[in-house]
Image (cartoon, helix red, strand yellow):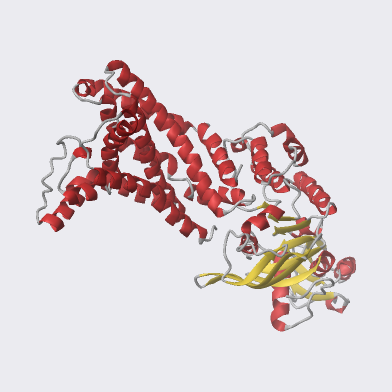
Amino acid sequence: MTAIETDGLTKRYGDLEAISDVDLTVERGEIFGFLGPNGAGKSTTIDVLLDFIRPTAGRASVLDDDPQENPRAVREQIGILPDEYSLYDRLTGREHVVFAIEMNDAADDPDEILERVGLADAADQRAGDYSKGMGQRLALGMALVGDPDVLILDEPSSGIDPNGMHEIRTLLREEADRGATVFFSSHALEQVEAICDRVCVLDDGELLAVSTVENLRDSLDSRSVLVLTLDANPDPDLDLNDDHGLLELPDVTDVERTETALRIECADPGVKSAAISRVEDTGASVVDIDVEQASLEDLFAELTTDSTEGADPIETPGGERA
Amino acid sequence: MSATLRIARAEVTDAVRSRALWVVTAVLSLFVVTRLWLYGDLLAGTTYPFLSTLDTFAEFVPLLVIILGYRAVVGERVSGRIRLLLGQPGRRRDIVTGKYVGRAATLLAVVLAVALLLSAFVVAQFGTDGPTEIVGGLAVLVLYTFAWLGVTVGVSSVAISETRVIGVLIGLYALCVVLWDTLVMSLVSLVVTGQADTGVDPLAGRFATLEEPTWFLYVNRLNPLHAFDGARYYVPDLLDIAFVGGTTTAPHAPNIFGLGVLLAWATVPVLVGYWRFQRADLD
């Protein structure tokens, strides 16, 4: 039995295709990251899983139930932290959790849930007085009620500070250890890589790749860029095509020269120090060193190029290429 | 307890803590008491002062229901709270029914509290209304509140913008309260009799006991205000007949039709609203 499965899932709004032909399989018990920039279609996909919206084509299933045909059965087995939700401003944190416990016919202790999400001290405060992060913790607590088999979390990190995120990761690991499947979306790789077994990347409504986190990180690291700021007193005879012999180095893939800077693209981060010495050997004085980490957007761009040009696909052990 | 009742209970708890509810209740009470004070002399001349004063509610209940109820479903969609509710086990049906029941409980508490206060004043001052008038009048008031709640929750379930909901409901209110006699009935009269003048003096006697023209009796009761107007005299008469023996001078057919109209307003719009809401994308 798969935890989550989508098959050719497509949602169109008029001419706009929010997601197109998404095939996704999440196995039971894994922590699965759903990665993509804002507006990529992550929430649309999740909204279909929760039966908030209905697909134009294709189908989705959660624990082998179709959310549209059997929303109640699906919602009884899953815990949801949706995006763009809102709380009852005039109900306290505890009242929210009690509400969730009653809705689930669960036997949880509300205080224990509040303790787990770090709201024990604010249990009797009204949710209207909560900060964004506290509200997010409360909604997460409500999702944990009834020990759901699948947790679906849409951008759980939003509004939560780094410390809080660490707590939440611990919490999600506990849930996974108990046997729950955790499916969560994020636009930030560092949120996903710290915890996920597998990730998939969605961009512009299309599923680009399903991969392990290591593979994704490798391909990001391989695209780091070294930026050297050179002496601000430029040589009148400056040759902008002078690559300072950098291209002779293995793993330097590209060099761009401006009057005061050198951008060096490295396929292997280990080549950076060799590159710096090579530049200094040519007589240029380096006044500042900066490393541009390739962003997720770069990765998305690369993946998109891969899929259109048919270049090497990302390795997908345990997964499948979209 | 079903998901509907749990959602309803959360609704009520939330509403009881809202300032709007208490402000509206206070304004309603003040309005009713002021009217009683201003028109007390007129009431002294009527047979059933309590039933007469109930007409205060005809125009006030719809406003109360619209103000406290228009956000019932659309507000949940706009704010996103629907995502929190649907994140729990429960169906969309439970949202609509939960909202309906929750708002009904809140509104009935307000309306009945004010009406009971009013009945206590009236009975103490005039003492001419018997238990069947009080009970029958209150029952019709409850039905009338449900009628406006049905249309309010129905419209709220269909629309995706709060402004549109309030626009439609205020438009409907204006049609029923302001434009009905002058525009709608005149137009219908023109079609039926060829004359724009309905030939009925709106102030002549109790509408409930009016016996003709037949078309007027039915068309006029399509407006919940007028259906309420007839029913608040007719239902106490029915109670009299059933429990203490008595007769009524009111014709049965149009008055029963009027009760049916109120029941239809209470249910049909909300069923249509639910049917549309069930098929909507909640994004």
How many numbered circles are shown?
Answer: 0
Tell me if I can see residue B26 in this picture.
no
Q: Which residue lies at the image location 79% right of the left edge and 62% below the top edge?
A: A28
From the top left corner, tell me how far across and down residue A271 is, in percent: 88, 69
From the top left corner, tell me how far across and down residue A198 is, in percent: 80, 64
Q: Looking at the image, is A181 positioned above or below residue B34?
A: below
The quadrant the C terminus of chain A occupies is: bottom right
Give left or right: position of B117 versus A4: left
From the top left corner, tell me how far across and down residue A197 is, in percent: 82, 62
Give left or right: position of A294 versus B55: right
Name the residue furthest top. Answer: B124
Q: Looking at the image, is B50 positioned above or below residue A322?
A: above
Give left or right: position of A252 versus B214: right
The quadrant the N terminus of chain A occupies is: bottom right
Tell me if I can see residue B254 in this picture.
yes
Of A70 and A130, which appears nearest the observer? Answer: A70
Q: Quadrant of residue A253?
A: bottom right
Q: Quadrant of residue A153?
A: bottom right
Name the residue furthest bottom. Answer: A310
Of B235 and A136, which appears nearest the observer? Answer: B235
From the top left corner, tell me how far across and down residue A142 is, in percent: 69, 45
Of B173 and A305, which appears nearest the observer? Answer: B173
